[in-house]
Amino acid sequence: MASMQLMRRESAFVHEVTQDSPKSPEARLGMKVEDLWDVQEPQLTPTEKLNACFEGIPVSAFPPAPSSQVIEIKSDTSLAEAVRILADHKILSAPVVDVDAPEDASWIDRYIGVVEFAGIIVWILHQSEPPSPRSPTSESALEAAVNRVTNAASLGTLGPEDAAATSGNFFEALTSSEFYKNTKVRDIAGSFRWAPFLALQKSNSFLTMLLLLSSYKMKSIPVVDLGEAKIDNIITQSSVIHMLAECSGLQWFESWGTRKLSEIGLPLMAPDRIVKVYEEEPVLQAFKLMRKKKIGGIPIVDSSGRKVVGNISIRDVHFLLTAPEIYHDYRSITAKNFSTAVKGYLETHHEISPFARGMVICTKNYSIKELIMKLDSEKIHRVYVVDDAGNLEGVITLRDILSRLVHEPRGYFGDFFDGVLPLPSNSRV
């Protein structure tokens, strides 16, 4: 009976928020939050009210992601093709379908994991195997170069002396090799975080989704249709930020969004704890730090370590693999050289990318609403906080913002994670 009531509530809610209206689906969803906000107990704090509102909304009500962003990649797809697909669709990750799974397989058996740029970085940093035995270059300079990069990308510290290991023609050699061309997505399953992945059901609540995207550091969450045994939607941190931007003017959003960053404890990290890369360090140092610290981006700073001169995000790793020729004339691919080469490439090819716009900054005097609008309009995942002299004071990410929207009640998840599938047996993450 409880299950039937839940299904009826979910169906009625979805019908209500999708009726014809001049407002966007995200704005209509925000209006439903407004309706729930108005009936909350007056003694509740604003955060407690928001928790209660989001707990009353099923994730099935969240607007569907654009079809260009709900992409599945087959397990026998080459790594090179997977990189191209992720880059072309401007997405960070995609679920991997097991081509050997039977047609009537459950969703757990249908997918083997999620391929993501973070995992591709793991593959690059841990690449120690020689090229395919079928290749005549098994003892070539390529193998030596791969091994040198692996050694330089270990969990030790990369210094200036290691910059030569990431020579300008290294990635040209790697991407033109039979080894790279023959590597399949399923071959890097050790870089997958889950087997296959943590997912929500359509009846789970918004609050559950928001907590997973913030407190549990998930950048995206698949929503599965158990009946169809497939992914029904993918909700990302960016799509939630866009929803919040569309709620401008609503009482619940304004009461929260007009507060200054400093009032809600942002940025979270002190300046001396910011993970950063110096512009003369090897670019692989930046990607290595992102992987090690499990973060999605890193500032490039000048020799003083206080001035931000650029930004590298985890998705930018694709430029090493999709346009390796642009570094050919560099003796080494430093963070500065990488940034210069990629910007030149984007300008020459007239491509629009957040990378071309450079880093985005703000001050602690910004309101949370102003920051959300900036993040949404620029389609970026982080903003650097600077003082009046332009010195780096902090970093604010999409996750940081969502963590200030809701809080996790004691014992909220209960046994939710008991069914989480383990890491792949060959995991290197």
Image: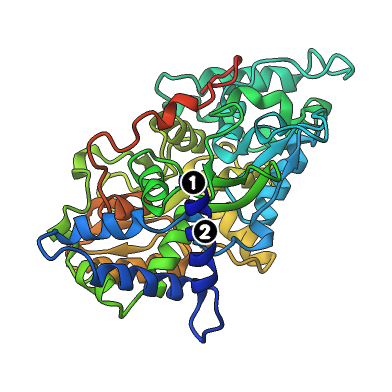
For marks 2 and 1, the one nearer the N-term is: 1
Q: Quadrant of residue 358?
A: bottom left
* Residue 293 on image: x %, y %: 38, 32
Which element carries disc 1, helix, strand or loop? loop
Residue underneath mark 2: 8
Q: CA distance from mark 2 to mark 1?
A: 11 Å
Q: Please state if 370 lies on the left or on the right of 150 as rendered.
A: left
Residue at image position (87%, 19%) is 135
Q: Position of residue 311 (x, y in %)?
A: 43, 52
Q: Is residue 21 above or below residue 6?
A: below
Q: How is the image coloured?
A: rainbow
x 31%, y 60%: residue = 53
Q: Nearer the viewer, residue 272 or 373?
A: 373
Q: Is residue 325 visible?
A: no
x, y (%) of residue 109? Answer: 70, 29
- Say whether residue 379 is left or right of residue 180: left
Q: Looking at the picture, tell me which residue is in the foreground, 6 or 253.
A: 6
Where is residue 428? Give x, y as percent.
54, 19
Residue 1 numbered tag: 1
